[in-house]
Amino acid sequence: MFDVTQAMENILHGHQLEKPEALELYHQPLEPLCQAADQLRRHFCADQFDICTIINGKSGNCSEDCKFCAQSAHNHTCAAQYPLLPASEIVAHAKENDAQGVLRYSIVTSGKRLTDAEVEHMCEAVRQIRREVGISVCVSFGLLNEAQYRRLKDAGVTRVHNNLETSRRFFAQVCTTHTYEDKIEAIKAAQAAGLAVCSGGIMGLGETPEDRIDMAITLRSQGIRSVPVNMLNPIPGTPFEKNARLTPDEMRRIVAVYRFLLPDASIRLAGGRGLLSDKGESCFLSGANAAISGDMLTTSGITTKTDMALLKKLGYQAGLCNE
């Protein structure tokens, strides 16, 4: 019989949970699983909570056919479409977030990748942020190469976001216009350029528990220590619009198992958190210790003020983790 407490003790003493054990762990009673995951979080991460915000720096008309996404040109949604925002607007938004106590700010753009000219435009925005604000800057600009990532690092970027979305096995059911290996290559290019990488996925796409575990193990093999766990918001006009929403208990189970598999990572609740009745509070007691605050790319989120109050209630301290 699988013993959750023993599994936790093994991890505390340096054991790495492998796939067969993780599959057993996934189906253990929820409350003991979540309690053990929270103990692991406290041991490896203390009370540090990594809170970040994002800005949609370029929206819509994306060439990629990701079946969950409101911004794909292949889908029929009401998402806004606009080119790169002016640097002044991006900087002003960074200043607003800095004033609210946010320590990390991420600029996200639609499309398979930015062009060299667009990368330079964003480099100038980042340089201005670093001169005038000082907030840590993360970027999500698609499948860039190492040279482009080096330019961004030189401008002041510290972290790159690039979600795997799901397991290698299931990825073709989610997107066909680029491959899983394209994602891995971009992650390796960012790391080669000296940047930290934030990468995770979306739960509720139709994947199995095994797919969820496989993605976590892939992230671990790539040295990823900032892991967004999104919950699908089934957006009308996308192929996944009729997918059933996950329940709060399903999300708790996922983040708890991810804490066992990635014990020292920032497990970050991201898109879809606002659909949870408690806005993710129970997940923050089940192994999660990071979040995206404020609005998401095409949907409304939870205000930074509300999140800061929640962190205080739960005894967390906002800080930059795994920088």
Image: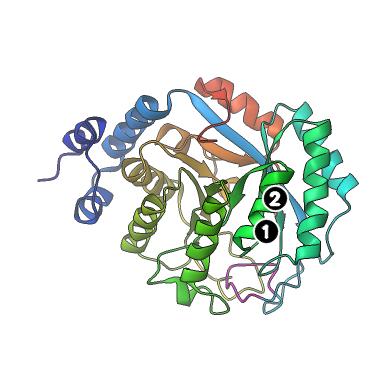
Query: Label 2 sits on what residue type?
Result: Leu
**Colour option used:** rainbow
Q: Residue 71, percent across and down?
A: 70, 68
User: Magenta segment, which residues?
Assistant: 64-72
**What secondary structure is marked by label 2?**
helix
Q: Residue 38, percent across and down?
A: 36, 31
Residue 237 in the magenta stretch? The answer is no
Q: Which mark is residue 94?
A: none
Q: Is residue 271 visible?
A: no
Q: In the figure, is residue 316 to the left or right of 96?
A: left
Quadrant in the picture for residue 93: top right
Mark 2 packing: few (<14 Cα in 10 Å), some, or many (20+)?
many
Q: Are marks 1 and 2 in contact (CB under 8 Å)?
A: yes
Residue 70 in the magenta stretch? The answer is yes
For residue 146, above or below residue 238: above
Disc tally is 2
Image quarter hosting the C terminus: top right
Residue at x 83% of width, y 55% of height? 121
Q: Residue 219, percent across and down?
A: 41, 53
**What secondary structure is marked by label 1?**
helix
For residue 282, above or below residue 296: above
Identify the residue at the far left of this view: 1
Q: In the figure, is residue 207 to the left or right of 127?
A: left
| Residue corresponding to mark 1 | 148
Residue at x 56% of width, y 46% of height? 194
| Residue corresponding to mark 2 | 152
Q: Residue 5, percent across and down?
A: 20, 33
What kind of secondary structure does the magenta stretch mostly adopt? loop
Q: In the figure, is residue 211 to the left or right of 1?
A: right
Residue at x 74% of width, y 44% of height? 155
